Amino acid sequence: METKFKVVMKKDDKIMKEFLSFTYRAKGQMNRAKLYVFAAGMFFIGYMAAGDGNVIAGNIIALVGILMVLMGLVLPKIALARLKKADEGYNKGTEYTYVFAKGYMHVYENGELAQNVGGYRQVTCFYGDERNYYLGINNDDLFLLPMKNFVEGNADEFIDFIQYVSDESYEFLPTELKNRWMKYRANQKMRDA
């Protein structure tokens, strides 16, 4: 069968960061934002306690707020380090080639067939952002496909192709603030209608 799309990539630091960022967006987790809001609340409570003459309690509460901010800054770096350590393809510098034909998908590692995904009925989710597509297979594997790495086929036509062959809907999960705001506004309008 003729190849419709081919994506060639290596996992590097940028890809790993984007994968981690996507998993947080897809799960709807706003852990860092919630942590920062809670830390701001702790600062405010500490300030109010110190203003009422209870300086020691105010300082302790403010210190807890500082620790929360530090956790928010450090936890993503820890998660990224753990992801890198656990990923064999990243550690070995493996080159991945994803081949999409009319009736099947194949994954090659360093030129050798590593996974015969088979038909497109195994596609369980399909997401994208401004730079990448994310294709979930059997609720087990998640293929990150950078749009700039399409060597065959047009990345803009990939959405229509996957939706047609898999009957899976596409969900845009933006990374850029402007696009996040536009998506939020569109969702609000749909809820109000």
Image: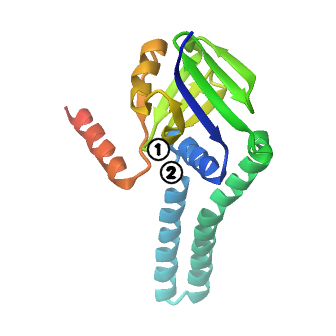
Question: Of the numbered discs in the image, which one, if any, rests on residue 142?
Answer: none
Q: Amino acid at mark 2?
A: Met
Q: Which residue is the site of mark 1?
A: 131
82 above or below 59? above
Going by the image, does 188 lie left or right of 34?
left
Question: Residue 182, how many percent across, how many down?
Answer: 29, 46
Q: Which residue is the site of mark 2?
A: 30
Report the residue at 62% width, 24% height from top.
Answer: 139
| Helix, strand or loop at mark 1 | loop
Report the residue at 51% width, 76% height from top.
Answer: 43
| Helix, strand or loop at mark 2 | loop
Quadrant where the C terminus is found in the figure: top left
> Mark 2 and 1 residues: CB-CB less than 8 Å, in contact?
no
| Mark 1, other Cα within 10 Å: few <14 / some 14–19 / many ≥20 | few
Question: Residue 54, how many percent across, how many down?
Answer: 55, 86
Going by the image, does 149 lie left or right of 161?
right
Snapshot quadrant of residue 72: bottom right
19 above or below 120? below
Going by the picture, which residue comes out furthest to the left? 193
Q: CA distance from mark 2 to mark 1?
A: 21 Å
Q: Amino acid at mark 1?
A: Arg
| Mark 2, other Cα within 10 Å: few <14 / some 14–19 / many ≥20 | few
Task: Pick whichever of labels 2 and 1 is earlier in the sequence.
Answer: 2
Question: Residue 61, how many percent across, how many down?
Answer: 58, 76
Going by the image, does 60 lie left or right of 168?
right
25 above or below 37? above
Snapshot quadrant of residue 1: top right
Report the residue at 54% width, 61% height from top.
Answer: 35
Going by the image, does 76 lie left or right of 168?
right
Snapshot quadrant of residue 56: bottom right
Observer-nearest residue: 38 or 4?
4
